[in-house]
Amino acid sequence: MGGVGPTVSLRVPGVGDLASMSSGGRFGVITAGAVVVTVLLFLVALVLGHLF
């Protein structure tokens, strides 16, 4: 293992390598992820609210 440096790869399917993205690109990915999670949680709460 002498001389081998660790390489970090944060590849996300459909998005690309997060480690090589600009800070604006990473912010966009984080924002899109937060919106998707928020919408999913809202839909789950809506469905559960109608059931109970």
Image (spheres, grey):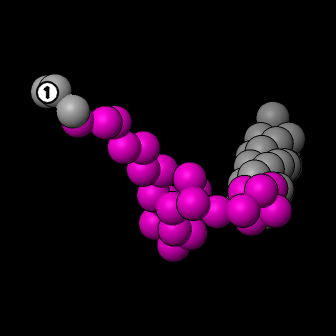
Q: Quadrant of the N terminus?
A: top left
**Looking at the image, which residue is at 48% across and 50% down?**
10
Q: Residue furthest top?
A: 2
Q: Quadrant of residue 11?
A: bottom left
Label 1, on which residue?
1
**Looking at the image, which residue is at 77% across and 45% down?**
41
**Looking at the image, which residue is at 46% across and 66% down?**
13
Nearest the eye: 13 or 10: 10
Extent of the magenta region: 4-27
Nearest the eye: 40 or 21: 21
Q: Quadrant of the C terminus?
A: top right
Q: Is residue 52 left or right of residue 16?
A: right
Q: Amino acid at mark 1?
A: Met
Q: Is residue 24 left or right of residue 11?
A: right
**Looking at the image, which residue is at 42% across and 43% down?**
8
Q: Is residue 47 visible?
A: no
Q: x, y percentage for residue 12?
A: 49, 59
Nearest the eye: 37 or 13: 13
Q: Residue furthest bottom?
A: 14
Q: x, y percentage for residue 23?
A: 77, 56
Q: Quadrant of residue 21?
A: bottom right
Q: Is residue 21 left or right of residue 41?
A: left
Asked which secondary structure carries label 1, the reply is loop
Look at the picture and state if 23 lies above or below 6.
below
Q: Is residue 46 left or right of residue 1?
A: right
Q: Residue furthest left?
A: 1
In the rendered image, residue 14 lying in the magenta stretch gets the answer yes
Q: x, y percentage for residue 51?
A: 77, 42
Q: Is residue 12 visible?
A: yes
Count of marks overlaid on the render:
1
